[in-house]
Amino acid sequence: MAAERLVVIGGDAAGMSAASQARRLKGPDELSITAFERGHFTSYSACGIPYWVSGDVEQRDDLIARTPEEHRARAIDLRMRTEVTEIDVAGQRVRALDRDSGETSWTGFDKLVIATGARPVRPALPGMDAAGVHGVQNLDDGQALLDTLDRATGRRAVVVGAGYIGVEMAEAMLKRGFEVTVLNRGEQPMATLDPDMGRLVHDAMDGLGITTVNGAAVTAIRTGADGRAAAVETAGASYPADVVVLGIGVEPETTLARAVGLPVGPHGGLLTDLSMRVVGHDNIWAGGDCVEVLDLVAGRTRHIALGTHANKHGQIIGSNVGGGYGTFPGVVGTAVSKVCDLEIARTGLREKDAHAAGLRFVTATIESTGRAGYYPGARPMTVKMLAEYRTGRLLGVQIVGRDGAAKRVDVAAVALTAGMTVEQMTALDLGYAPPFSPVWDPVLVAARKTVTVLRKAGTA
Ligand SMILES: Cc1cc2nc3c(=O)[nH]c(=O)nc-3n(C[C@H](O)[C@H](O)[C@H](O)COP(=O)(O)OP(=O)(O)OC[C@H]3O[C@@H](n4cnc5c(N)ncnc54)[C@H](O)[C@@H]3O)c2cc1C
């Protein structure tokens, strides 16, 4: 019997996890696997780009988990620099363009995986494509930025965007010896936090010597006589720049899928069922940054471009196409990042999400430390907690602080997933010894305070 044919579009986290997992379950005589990647790299960690640019990670190749040769040695026919330009759903085939030779060809499939990722938002403003303006979406982008940094004669960096990529790149530029200005369109940096917690990030960035300008919507990149970026313009000001780094978010890359009418949700991502199968299409799966995921707390879909989800999606898709079984129930919205020694974490709903979901809630914010107060090196952290009015159900947690602040959010992520109340959380048996936490862990202190607030509101 002829082997079943699996075609994968996109050769990074979701796509190659799917291909690898399918190959673990089925050998080449049962399943042929062809994967298309239009870029120069496969199985790379975009997440590591800020740390490569900063110099914390020495070499580009440290960010590559598996080379094309390694995939091919496992009987995955990986075609690099080859872009899928069309999906023929009824004919069960894809058309691909070899970007080096210019040749196109069709490849048939029995099962198709779409893992085309996301594309960076790049507003059509004057000067956006000038030399010296850099995105950081993939390893080519990272290399181009490093080349600019090596050549730069001045030391002024302007980072556009203050989401997690913006603040991580601000740190990278600082470590590279640049004077850094971050232009943020919003009220505070890190819009994934409530503004009161974002303010803490702003103040800490100030303390690190990073200038953050809030409410600064970019109108143009001004170029110099040499055509290179020379300044970033906003409505009211001009910020001189020797290099400009863009971190203004991404949107799902679903051009191919939309062209053939595959279903997309309100945020532009493909819609899948629990097994990551595209809704209404038995033989097509999709995962990673090109799909929407179910927010288990808010009960609606969202687009969240994170590698942690993409890898899980790929693993689940690979299991399902390889004859096993896996499901992805959804997310609670957990994310961590840092700027220098300041750690930033969030999970669940912010105040505005809870309002949008029509929930009534209370909030509590506490200050604590990451170790016992008397233990050397204890540093402050702030924890904000949201709980549902009347039921006391945990809705969200945000943490800003140092020394182990970020990963504390994982306790809250588990509590959210389990649907715990803040009262139940106060009794969690978390580890304690002075070097690791105060006797009451900051998350437990926040839960206790939230219970008090609920009681005062007459509901707990
Ligand atoms: C600077 C930066 C830092 C990040 N840090 C973190 C972090 O700390 N934690 C975290 O969880 N996530 C982080 N992420 C996000 C994470 O990298 C992505 O969520 C993850 O890479 C998504 O994987 P994916 O496979 O869905 O998409 P991608 O990694 O974007 O891969 C999609 C691939 O498909 C290829 N492709 C697209 N269309 C076609 C086509 N038509 N034909 C052939 N190939 C095609 C693309 O070239 C690309 O290689 C970061 C991202 C960036 C940019």
Image: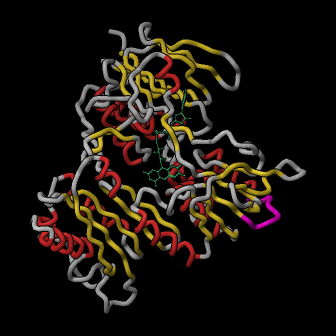
- Magenta span contains residue 155: yes
Quick one: 285 or 251, which is closer to the camera? 251
User: Residue at 49% of width from left, 32% of height from top?
Assistant: 116
Residue reaching furthest right? 225
Quick one: 241 or 60, which is closer to the camera? 241
Quick one: 263 or 232, which is closer to the camera? 232
User: Residue at 42% of width from left, 36% of height from top?
Assistant: 267
Colour setting? secondary structure
Decide: is 162 above or below 458.
above
Quadrant placement of the C terminus: bottom left
User: Residue at 35% of width from left, 35% of height from top?
Assistant: 21
Report the side of 64 relative to 298 (left or right): right
User: Residue at 67% of width from left, 39% of height from top?
Assistant: 124
| Residue extent of the magenta highlight | 149-156
- Magenta span contains residue 365: no
Residue 51 in sight: no
Image location of residue 108, percent across then percent down: 46, 12
Report the side of 394 relative to 314 (left or right): left
Report the side of 274 relative to 261 (left or right): left
Image location of residue 309, percent across then percent down: 37, 44
Image location of residue 306, percent across then percent down: 42, 47
Residue 170 in sight: yes
Image location of residue 330, percent across then percent down: 28, 42
Residue reaching furthest top? 91
Quadrant placement of the N terminus: top left
Among the 4 quarters of the image, the one containing residue 195: bottom left
How many numbered discs?
0
Residue reaching furthest bottom? 374
